[in-house]
Image: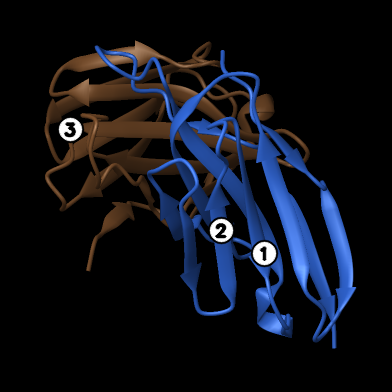
Amino acid sequence: GQQLNQSPQSMFIQEGEDVSMNCTSSSIFNTWLWYKQDPGEGPVLLIALYKAGELTSNGRLTAQFGITRKDSFLNISASIPSDVGIYFCAGWPMNSGGSNYKLTFGKGTLLTVNP
Amino acid sequence: DVKVTQSSRYLVKRTGEKVFLECVQDMDHENMFWYRQDPGLGLRLIYFSYDVKMKEKGDIPEGYSVSREKKERFSLILESASTNQTSMYLCASSFPWRGYLNTEAFFGQGTRLTVV
């Protein structure tokens, strides 16, 4: 199936630092989604991107849909302890029509923030 | 507020038992998904359904089956639970890709299943 390469796998940062993570694919995606998962909970949608080049912010979070449609990044500015969790990228591949509706996920970035 | 609700947060079952995990969504979504999540392996798709009574196998369907008799409800069934099915199970729903917006997937809170 489709693969999303998400990096880094984990990050340890100090409170107040900025964070950047990204996802890449060998194939084109129609949509990029970024989720955060707190321990023991389901993932929660942070940002959705629908157009190549789109740059969208949600508070301290900023995400971009790459021009090539094969990548996306998420930035978190001025991190705080509650930013701790796993961040997932996800996307709908270009061949998402018909009955093939498989939303594809990266393996996640585990973020730890030291107060 | 969008809602995907899984019937249990925690379950403990015995090896060989038949296990039902239930998921209900209130957003009139056509698509529903079941994933399992294990450390280091990310989210792996077990089954998904794109309409009532329609289903497709995901990446790891062995040992599982599903049922979708109503649009809002998608059940995951472990026919004979085994210890290697101990995991976090996540249900999600979405509209299908139609070339426009509003195709975000929304997740339930997860069910932590332990098979002993």
Lower sequence index among marks 2 and 1: 2
Do the residues under discs 2 and 1 have CB atoms within 8 angstroms? Answer: yes
> Residue B33: in sight, yes or no?
yes
Residue A50 percent location from the top left of the image = 38, 44
Relative to residue A32, is residue B44 depicted above or below? above
Find disc 3 in the rendering and name its residue: B30
| Protein chain holding label 2 | A
For residue A4, which quarter of the picture? top right
Q: Residue at x 41, y 53 (%)?
A: A48
Which quarter of the rendering shows the C terminus of chain B? top right
- Residue A77: name its quadrant: bottom right
> Label 1 near label 3: C-beta < 8 Å?
no
Drawing shade for chain B = brown
Residue located beneath label 1 in the image: A75
Write down the colour of chain A: blue
> x, y percentage for residue A34?
53, 52
User: What chain letter is assigned to the residue under label 3?
Assistant: B
Percent coordinates x, y for residue B61 in the rendering: 49, 14
The x, y position of residue B56, in whole percent, is 34, 12
The residue shown at (46%, 59%) is: A47
Judging depth in this view, the residue of B19 and A71 nearest the camera is: A71
In the rendered image, the vertical position of residue A1 relative to residue B72, given as above or below: above
The image quarter in which residue B40 lies: top right
Judged left or right of residue A42, residue B86 is right
Asked if badges 2 and 3 are on one and the same chain, I answer: no
Residue type indicated by callout 1: Asn
